[in-house]
Image (tube, rainbow, N blue to C red):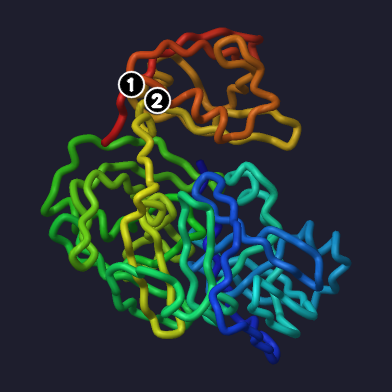
C-alpha cells in the first residue's frame, strides 16, 4: 500500500491558540485502518476524522472538507513531502477541538488527501499535526483503538522513557539498526517504516539481508526495496524481524536530503502502547500485550493494488520474482473477483486479507485486462521475514 503523506508545512503559522483542559485524563475512541489512527475532531463544531500524524509539523485539512465546510482559503504556503515540494493553500478555522484540548483561530494547510484516504480505505478529513499534538501528553493503543490525553501522572504505566531529538516541530528517535546508529523520524502518519538510500548504503556495508523484495511502489510513483531487518534497538528495547522499506535515490522531498535517515512508521508503533510528551521531547514505549503479529503479512502472491471510488481494484505493482510475476500478472490488471467472490464491496484491508493466507494456498483471480477477461490461479509464498 501507499506510503501515507508526510507533511512538513512551511511558511504557514497559526494565530492565537486557547488551550482548555480539565484536570484529569480523557479517553478517546479512535479507529485504526491499515496502520492509520483516525482521531475524532471537531472543526467549527463539525465532527471529522483526522489522521494522527507526529511526522507533520502542522495540521492540515483536505480539499473536499474545505468545500464541505465552506472555508475560505487565506493564501499559499509550501509543503515538503516525502517525494516533493508542493504549493498548498491555507484556511483559518474558528476552533479545533480534540477531547478537552481546544485551539482557536487556527490556520490549517489545505491539501489533497485523496491518496491518503485511498491508502487507509476510509475517508480522511484532515491531518492532526504537532502544532496541536504539542498541547498535551497522550497515549495511543493500537490494539484497544484508544487515545488518552492528560497529565503523564494520569496515563498509567508509561514504560521505557526515551529522549527524542527535536528539529523545529519534528521529532527523531535514536535507533540502532543491527549495529548502525541512526535517528529516524517519529511518524505515526506513515503506515510503513522507511529507510533512506544513504542509510541503506551504510547498513549494507555491515549486514546482508536474507531476502530483498524489489518492485515496491507508492501511489506517488516512488520505488523502493523491502527487507527484513534482523534487529532494531531503541534503548533497552529490541525488535526482531522488522520489515523496512528502502527508498531508492530521490531527487526531491525529504528523502533527497543525504542527512535524512528515514521514518519509523505505524508498522513499528503498533507493537507498543506509545506515550508522547512532545513539549518535552519525550517518548515512552511499553510492549502492547494486545498486539497480535500478522503471521501471513508476507505470505502472499506479491502484488500491490489501489481501489478507485468506483470500487475497481487495480494492480499498481508486481513484486519481482513473486508468484504473481511468475503467473504473468501485470500493473494495470483490474481484479474483479477472488476465489469466485466479487471484490467490489470489499475494503482494501479485506481484499488484502484474502491475498495473505497460509503458505501454498491457491488463489483464483478474475482479472479484467485490455485483451479481455482472464482467470489466473496463483499460490501464496513466504516472501519476507
Question: Can you identify the residue that label 2 sits on?
Answer: 300
Please, which residue is most extreme toward the bottom here?
16
Tell me the residue at 69%/25% (across/down): 344
Q: Is residue 346 left or right of residue 329?
A: right
Q: Is residue 44 left or right of residue 139?
A: right
Tell me the residue at 64%/28% (across/down): 346
Residues at circles 1 and 2 in contact by the CB criterion of under 8 Å: yes
Q: Is residue 233 left or right of residue 101?
A: left
Tell me the residue at 53%/27% (across/down): 331
- For the residues labelled 1 and 2, the Cα–Cα distance comes to 6 Å
Question: Can you identify the residue that label 1 sits on?
Answer: 381
Residue 315 in the image: x percent, y percent? 55, 28
Residue 82 in the image: x percent, y percent? 49, 60
* Label 1 crowd bin: few (<14), some (14–19), many (20+), radius 10 Å: many
Give the label on residue 9, or none. Answer: none
Q: Quadrant of the C terminus?
A: top left
Comparing 356 with 76, the one in front is 356
Comparing 127 with 213, the one in front is 127
Answer yes or no: is residue 368 visible.
no
* Label 2 crowd bin: few (<14), some (14–19), many (20+), radius 10 Å: many
Tell me the residue at 36%/57% (across/down): 272
Determine whether the residue tagged by mark 1 lies in a helix, strand or loop. Answer: strand
Amino acid at each position: 500500500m501507499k506510503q501515507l503523506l508526510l507533511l512538513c508545512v512551511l511558511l504557514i503559522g497559526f494565530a492565537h491558540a486557547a488551550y482548555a483542559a480539565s484536570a484529569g485524563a480523557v479517553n478517546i475512541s479512535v479507529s485504526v485502518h491499515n496502520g492509520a489512527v483516525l482521531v475524532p475532531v471537531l472543526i467549527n463544531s463539525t465532527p471529522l476524522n483526522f489522521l494522527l500524524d507526529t511526522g507533520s509539523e502542522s495540521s492540515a485539512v483536505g480539499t473536499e472538507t474545505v468545500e464541505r465546510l465552506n472555508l475560505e482559503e487565506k493564501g499559499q504556503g509550501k509543503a515538503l513531502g516525502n517525494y516533493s515540494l508542493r504549493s498548498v493553500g491555507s484556511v483559518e478555522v474558528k476552533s479545533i477541538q480534540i477531547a478537552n484540548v481546544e485551539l482557536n483561530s487556527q490556520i490549517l494547510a489545505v491539501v489533497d488527501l485523496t491518496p491518503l484516504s485511498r491508502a487507509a480505505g476510509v475517508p480522511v478529513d484532515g491531518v492532526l499535526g504537532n502544532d496541536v499534538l504539542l498541547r498535551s501528553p497522550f497515549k495511543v493503543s493500537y490494539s484497544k483503538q484508544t487515545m488518552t490525553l492528560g497529565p503523564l501522572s494520569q496515563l498509567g504505566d508509561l514504560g521505557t522513557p526515551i529522549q527524542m531529538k527535536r528539529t523545529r516541530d519534528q521529532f527523531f528517535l535514536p535507533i540502532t539498526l543491527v549495529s548502525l546508529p541512526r535517528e529516524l523520524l517519529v511518524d505515526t502518519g506513515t503506515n510503513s517504516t522507511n529507510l533512506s538510500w544513504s542509510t541503506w548504503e551504510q547498513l549494507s556495508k555491515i549486514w546482508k539481508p536474507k531476502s530483498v523484495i524489489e518492485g515496491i511502489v507508492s501511489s506517488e510513483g516512488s520505488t523502493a526495496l523491502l527487507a527484513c531487518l534482523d534487529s532494531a534497538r531503541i534503548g533497552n528495547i529490541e525488535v526482531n524481524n522488522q520489515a523496512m522499506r528502502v527508498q531508492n535515490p530521490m531527487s526531491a522531498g525529504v528523502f533527497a536530503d543525504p542527512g535524512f535517515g528515514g521514518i519509523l512508521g505505524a508498522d513499528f508503533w503498533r507493537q507498543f502502547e506509545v506515550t508522547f510528551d512532545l513539549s518535552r521531547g519525550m517518548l515512552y514505549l511499553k510492549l502492547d500485550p494486545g498486539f497480535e503479529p500478522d503471521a501471513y503479512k508476507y505470505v502472499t502472491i506479491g502484488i500491490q493494488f489501489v481501489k478507485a471510488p468506483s470500487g475497481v481494484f487495480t494492480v499498481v505493482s508486481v513484486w519481482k520474482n513473486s508468484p504473481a510475476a511468475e503467473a504473468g500478472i501485470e500493473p494495470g490488471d483490474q481484479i474483479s473477483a477472488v476465489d469466485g467472490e466479487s471484490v467490489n464491496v470489499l475494503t482494501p484491508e479485506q481484499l488484502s486479507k484474502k491475498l495473505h493466507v497460509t503458505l501454498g494456498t491457491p488463489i483464483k483471480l478474475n482479472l479484467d485486462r485490455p485483451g479481455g477477461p482472464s482467470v489466473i490461479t496463483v499460490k501464496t509464498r513466504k516472501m519476507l521475514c
